């Protein structure tokens, strides 16, 4: 063997002594000190096949958990309940109780479905409550809106949702399109702040041809605070049979188009305001 000419040449003799000590109840450390064998590999080979004495075995900390898990399984508990009760992993639970018979289902399939629906409803209610609290806290953070804050918000709102001229196609008209009533009302408040005469505003509904156009016009007239007679002929979207529409039902009102007449000067001011906002934002990034 590899150590035949070295310090541990008489391996068999050492093994006999090591085995004798092992059977006498010696630990590996005690055998090492007794035989002066400080190479762990050699030491392991000397006692190979000999079980350690019982006094050297550490008690298994999970023995009590295992016993409890088996007890609960025999009572009909599921893996999930045992895992939650004992605070151990599912893989451990499975290993400990897999030889035991599966418990009879506590509920019929119909009862299980009902419990799942109830649990889902509770979870959604809790999530809804969390969202409501978050939104209310955010709402209170806004407090009173100053004219300057509304002015800046309106500029950003228009640049996000309003029509914009292109270098290759200058169309200097303030035209705003949106389907959100809150956005529309904020935009109208902004126009009022700019002292844009309401007589200069034109309204038109942009909506799918299958929708209730008249109901949509009444809806937007109420949102904008104008008479339905102020609305121009609606623009109808043609139906694409390959498209599955989700914007249907009583809550679908299409979009409201708001155009400001003779608005080239206003539009160019909006462009300038927006460029000013961008310039200051860029400066903060440097």
Image: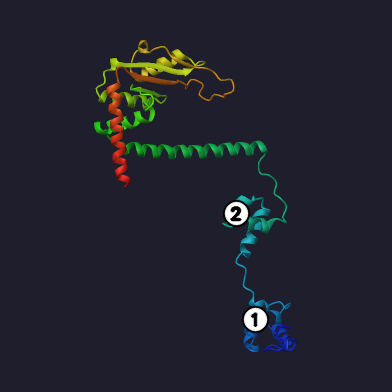
Q: On residue 28, which mark appears?
A: 1
Name the residue rendered at 64%, 51% in the picture.
79
Specify few, some or many for label 1: CA neighbours under 10 Å numbering under 14, 14-19, or 20 or more: some
Q: Earlier in the sequence, mark 1 or mark 2?
A: 1
Q: Can residue 150 be seen in this view?
A: no
Name the residue rendered at 66%, 83% in the picture.
26
Name the residue rendered at 54%, 24% in the picture.
245
User: Secondary structure under badge 2?
Assistant: helix
Q: Residue pushed farthest top? A: 229
Image-based side of 207 in relation to 243, left or right: left
Q: Nearer the viewer, residue 82 or 153?
A: 153
Looking at the image, is 237 positioned above or below residue 82?
above
Which image quadrant for residue 227?
top left
Q: At which x and y percent is residue 36? A: 63, 88
Which image quadrant for residue 160?
top left
Residue under label 2: 83
Q: Which one is in front in this view, the residue at disc 1 or the one at disc 2? A: 1
Image-based side of 169 in relation to 144, left or right: right
């Amino acid at each position: 063997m590899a150590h035949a000419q070295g310090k541990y040449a008489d391996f068999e003799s050492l093994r006999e002594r090591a085995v004798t000590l092992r059977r006498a109840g010696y630990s590996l450390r005690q055998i090492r000190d007794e035989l002066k064998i400080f190479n762990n590999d050699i030491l392991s080979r000397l006692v190979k096949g000999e079980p350690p004495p019982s006094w050297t075995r550490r008690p298994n900390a999970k023995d009590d958990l295992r016993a409890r898990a088996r007890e609960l399984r025999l009572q009909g508990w599921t893996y999930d309940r045992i895992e939650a009760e004992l605070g151990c992993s599912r893989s451990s639970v499975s290993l400990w109780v897999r030889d035991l018979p599966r418990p009879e289902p506590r509920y019929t399939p119909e009862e299980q479905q009902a419990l799942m629906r109830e649990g889902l409803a509770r979870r959604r209610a809790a999530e809804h409550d969390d969202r409501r609290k978050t939104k209310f806290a955010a709402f209170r953070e806004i407090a009173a809106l100053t004219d300057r804050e509304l002015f800046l918000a309106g500029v950003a709102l228009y640049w996000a949702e309003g029509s914009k001229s292109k270098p290759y196609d200058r169309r200097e008209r303030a035209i705003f399109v949106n389907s959100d009533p809150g956005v529309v009302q904020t935009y109208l408040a902004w126009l009022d702040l700019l002292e844009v005469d309401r007589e200069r505003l034109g309204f038109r509904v942009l909506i799918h041809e299958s929708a209730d156009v008249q109901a949509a016009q009444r809806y937007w007239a109420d949102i904008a605070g104008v008479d339905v007679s102020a609305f121009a002929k609606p623009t109808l979207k043609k139906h694409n049979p390959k498209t599955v529409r989700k914007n249907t039902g009583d809550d679908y009102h299409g979009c409201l188009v708001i155009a400001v007449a003779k608005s080239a000067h206003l539009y160019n001011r909006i462009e300038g305001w927006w460029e000013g906002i961008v310039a200051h934002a860029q400066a903060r990034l440097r």
